[in-house]
Image: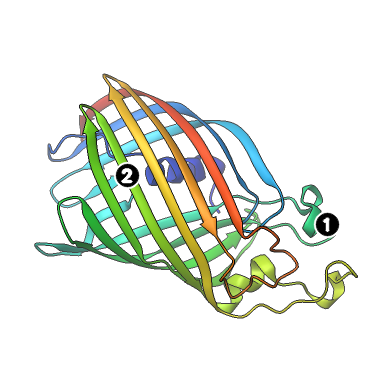
Amino acid sequence: MQPLLSRILCSILLLGPCAVSAAQGEYQLGVGTLAATQPHYPGSAQSAHFVWPVPYFTYRSAQLQIDRQGATGLLAQGEHWALNLSLAGALAVDSDKNQLRQGMPALDWIAEIGPALDVQLTPNLQLRLPVRAAFATDFKQGSAIGWRFEPQLRYQQAVAEAVQWESVLSLAASSKAYHQYFYGVAPEYSLATRPEYSASGGFSGWRFANGLSLRQGDWWFAVYSRYDYLADATVADSPLLVKEHQLSAGFVVVKILKTGLW
């Protein structure tokens, strides 16, 4: 995707709530730790478990806000809508460490970027419509691997002082190239237990994520969970997709070191 530090930063921005005031041009810098478990890829039989040091950054000005949703107000905005920048990504997977992909090429780091139309339906409920192009890289070379469309309903609610709850219900549709990258099996990699498979574009499944965060002074804590439902996905019959129901979870603790104007 991008250098490891930047990938983790992207994860923190996507998972954590913006912790800055409305002051123009205010930023916050910090460091923290992320502990998580997640599938190697959606539908994988195995998961990755890791504890990583992470950077933390938020920024808000009259023209630009950077937080968990990416870059807000960057392209265009109206009274109840905004055209923003949407970011997402996926971790690299060593095929030698994945039972289903033994002998196949590794899955590289994935970066996704594109515009998102955000419509504020109520003070607490937002409809987000992102379309993102996806790229894979091993840091020596990279290639485009298609696109994804991921409509989302995002609900946010303050449940107590300094405590924020967020739920996101989403579905995704992906191009043929995107599905083929993760779920296709070329003839030279086919086995009796892993037949050749050519993926098609279409529905990629449902996702329901929840997060709870707490801010105490210069400390920020967050816990999240994610459920993926893949039974109705276009690629559900791929030999590389064996789990139709998957859970992920993680915990983040951040120490905010500096707040200033920029």
Residue 68 appearing in the image: no
Q: Nearer the viewer, residue 195 or 258?
A: 195
Residue 197 appearing in the image: yes
**What's the amino acid at mark 2?**
Glu
- Label 1 or label 2, whichever lies nearer to me, is 2
Residue on which disc 2 sits: 166
Q: Residue at x 75, y 77 (%)?
A: 197
Extreme-top residue of the structure: 217
Q: Residue at x 57, y 64 (%)?
A: 230
Q: Nearer the viewer, residue 235 or 108?
A: 235
Q: Residue at x 45, y 26 (%)?
A: 32
Whole-percent x and y of residue 95?
Answer: 77, 54
Q: Give the CA distance from mark 1 to mark 2.
A: 37 Å
Quarter of the image that includes the C terminus: top left
Above or below, 193 against 46 in this view is below
Whole-percent x and y of residue 232?
Answer: 56, 71
**Marker count (numbered):** 2
Whole-percent x and y of residue 254?
Answer: 40, 26
Q: Nearer the viewer, residue 24 or 106?
A: 106
The quadrant in which residue 145 appears is bottom right
**What's the amino acid at mark 1?**
Gln
Of callouts 1 and 2, which one flags the residue occurring earlier in the amino acid sequence? 1
Whole-percent x and y of residue 206?
Answer: 48, 63
Q: Residue at x 85, y 59 (%)?
A: 103
Quarter of the image that includes the N terminus: bottom right
The quadrant in which residue 67 appears is top left
Q: Are marks 1 and 2 in contact (CB under 8 Å)?
A: no
Numbered badge on residue 102: 1
Dot 1: what SS? loop
Dot 2: what SS? strand
